[in-house]
Amino acid sequence: MVVATSSDIVRTADGTPLKARLQRVERARKLRAVGLVLPLFLFILISFVRPIVAMLQNGIDDPEYIGGELPQTMAALATWSGQDVPDETVFAALVGDLKQAQKDKSAPLIGKRLNYVLSGIRSKVIVTARKVDKLEAGPYKEAVIAIEPAWGQTETWLALRQAGSRFTPLYLMTVLDRTWPYASNAERNPATSMDLSPAFLILLAGFAGAFAVCQFGSRGAGAAPYLFAGTLAVLFLISIQQPDAFARYGVAAAGVLAGLSCFLGYAHPAWRPAAPYFLGGAIACLGWFVVLSTTVAVDPSQAVYMAIFVRTFWISLLVTLTTLVLGFPVAYLLASLPTKTSNLLMILVLLPFWTSLLVRTTAWFVLLLDNGVINDLLQFLHLTDHPLRLILSRFGTVVAMTHIQLPFTLLPIYSVMKTIPPSHVRAARSLGAGPFYAFWRVYFPQTVPGIAAGCLLTFILSLGYYITPALVGGPTDQMVSGFVALAINQENNWGKASALGTILLVATMILFFVYNRLVGVDKMKFG
Amino acid sequence: MRIELGLSGLLMAGVAAVGLSAATPAAAEDQLNVVSWGGAYQESQREAFFKPFAKDTSTKITEEEYNGEIAKIRAMVESKSVTWDVIDIDTQTALAACAEGILETIDWKKLGLDRSKFIGGDLQDCAVPNIVYATVIAYDTTKLNPGPTSIKDLFDLQKFPGKRGLQKNPFVNLEWALIADGVAIADVYKVLGTPEGVDRAFKKLDTIKSQTVWWEAGAQPPQLLADGQVVITSAWNGRIFNAVQKDKKPFKIVWDAQGFDWDWWSIPKGGPRVDLAYKFITYSSQPGPMANQTKYISYGPANKDAIPNVDPDVLPNLPTAPDNMKTALIVDPQFWADKGEELRTRFNAWLAQ
């Protein structure tokens, strides 16, 4: 029998157990590693994560919350039915609050916040606050309505009550071109009847198709989520533009179908992988149904933001595609030429890359002017007899942005191509493949990780463009960032600016998710 | 170098700006940081106010430029690191910033000025009127002869074919559309306050939309005219005056329904040199310096007492000249504070169509 003694434990020279000693060394190393990473981590936390969280918060946690300025009114409104003009007690509370607001000079802020829902109410609130200051005793109801008839309207009170909640969907609704039914920018003549238009039927068919593929198709479970997500996206876009009854029923039908698919997906083991997507879709439909049921579309003359989002994504997509078409051959050339020549060409690619963005944008401005270099040349060559509209147009925006973004797409592709051994194509050729076949089946698939990385980089950077569209774009080319700047700098509406940022961020993340499913981010290579 | 700022970038830049300004040590008492709009306008202020004030009071004046961004003032005041002592501010921003509580309420007794002597002196609590400017239409006399004579001509593509330059903002443009459509100047805001009036204004703007080049910075319209990009443009009268006087451009202003508006001096709240800021405003509101400014730019001094000191040759070019006052459209700040957001949204939707 072996007796375990302390001498069995391996010790270091100074007598501490080796295990403990190793642990200590390991811990010290880990701490050093963390210490090295910590500055960057803190920097990212403070300069990146915190502002984004603040932005997301500002979009729903009302930065212009006025409940604090109107405590008595909000308390009195808690029991109000919302059907009719409130009674004397509420008016008395309002007079009390407005007298205080007049003292604190906060009446303009109350007016400004209400003005987001009821355009034109701002000055009425300020005038009321000034005049109620002189009211000594009740009854207040008639007196206040006499001062400003707007207080005799239910909408004013509905807007006031809504502004009394700290968390508000108002800003998010605004940037989705939705509003409350009582708001002044609500659609003036909303269509009430349900419109079974062809688009609606196509959508239903889409969902039924997704459902059928998922349930009965042989390899359906894989394809169904994409089919479903696409239909959902189309439905979302249509529901923003269409009369409400139509949109609501469409979304409700989609939700029910999605829920059913999800349920059946879980019931049948073969289709189980698709079920979570359907569950997500059903929840999204439910949420969107609630939004559609409680809000209305803004008047078409006030609907601007959805178009801006669509435009932002469309321009980014165009720029990404042009950079790819222009950049891919150049990257191929750079990767296949001898180092000496390719280095020279590389400088040509990188030189603009190192030039200030503003300088390059201004250069394009000069080139594209009506009487600029390009138009002069075209007229000199008699290719056109009048100046073409190159600047202040979509064309100018895409050209200038493509120029700026080209290296971002090109460089990842180039660095991936550098790693592809030329022997692969040679082997394919020697085995009888034609030049195009060898390129397409052997070379091109190996460049996909670089293409994926470059395109993603360019697309996401393009979404945030601000200066370039502002300088060379026309009024229909301004992108989301421009409107964020407008909201912050001119309108002093941080809630709206944050909501615009939130929607852009969420939409980008959804696209990234889809992109990840299609291409796979882990397969991407930046070099 | 300006870089493209994404969304997070904008916020990051804000954080960085606050951080930087917080690090600036509090300067000595005899320094004053004045912020204005740059260009020919700030140059006129430099000659008429900054230089003489610096000399008389042995104060060092440092200048900065901005574009009326209320967010910058707000960030400074909220982070308690105010480095701007006096700002030149436009009517709308002054109203909004005053409501936010980020500007000092002006104590006219402390200024030692007679408020009633100032055009529009009682319009704002947090600002002292500084100059009166006008948004006018102007044209190149070598291209159009005879040129337009009224605001109706701006909308008349038959009589004056060619591109128009207009500010990318509903401000003044909607008023002009209504006036050109036959609304009397006195009734403009009453009509524009109704949905039908707004529809009518946009309908009128529709008629020249395809022929319009939209400008954003005040320096653009003289350039658009000079480049021949447009035949008629709206502009701030001082910029056209400057182009005529300094660059000898053959431009002419049409004084009809010109938008009459102010620029103001304000003091951001909680700055370290409020007293000196008051002194500066008092100094630059005196008739002498104010009249002196008109030598450099043709904006009307807000102090009525300055008018007798103005060079008689310059006088007819000022928005405050009696002849020009007859045709003026006084821009209503309260109307734009109320309806601005709605109309701007509609304007942007209209532009995107």
Image: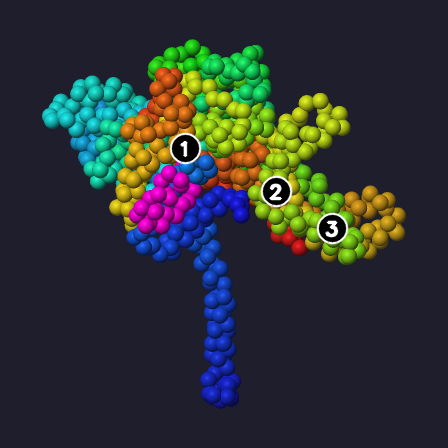
Q: Position of residue A238 (x, y in %)?
A: 53, 26
Q: Nearer the viewer, residue A424 or B279?
A: B279
**Residue A233 visible, this orientation:** no
| Disc assigned to residue B216 | none
Q: Secondary structure at mark 1?
A: loop
Residue highlighted by disc 1: B295
Dot 2: chain letter: A
Of callouts 2 and 3, which one flags the residue occurring earlier in the amino acid sequence? 3
Q: Position of residue A357 (x, y in %)?
A: 58, 44
How would you rate the neighbour count of disc 3 (Cα within 10 Å): few for under 14, some for 14-19, many for 20 or more? Answer: some
Amino acid identity at mark 3: Leu
Name the image quarter holding residue A60. top left
Provide the residue span drawn in magenta.
Answer: B46-73
Q: Nearer the viewer, residue A306 or A497?
A: A497
Amino acid identity at mark 2: Arg
The residue depicted at 53 percent of the width and 18 percent of the height is B208
Marks 2 and 1: in contact by CB < 8 Å? no
Queried whether the magenta region covers residue A355, the answer comes back as no
Residue highlighted by disc 2: A360
Dot 1: chain letter: B
Q: Position of residue A444 (x, y in %)?
A: 75, 47
Q: CA distance from mark 3 to mark 1?
A: 55 Å
Q: Secondary structure at mark 2?
A: helix
Residue highlighted by disc 3: A345
Q: Position of residue B67 (x, y in %)?
A: 43, 38
Amino acid identity at mark 1: Lys
- Does residue A340 sit above or below A9 in this rendering? above
Image check: A111 left or right of B143?
Answer: left
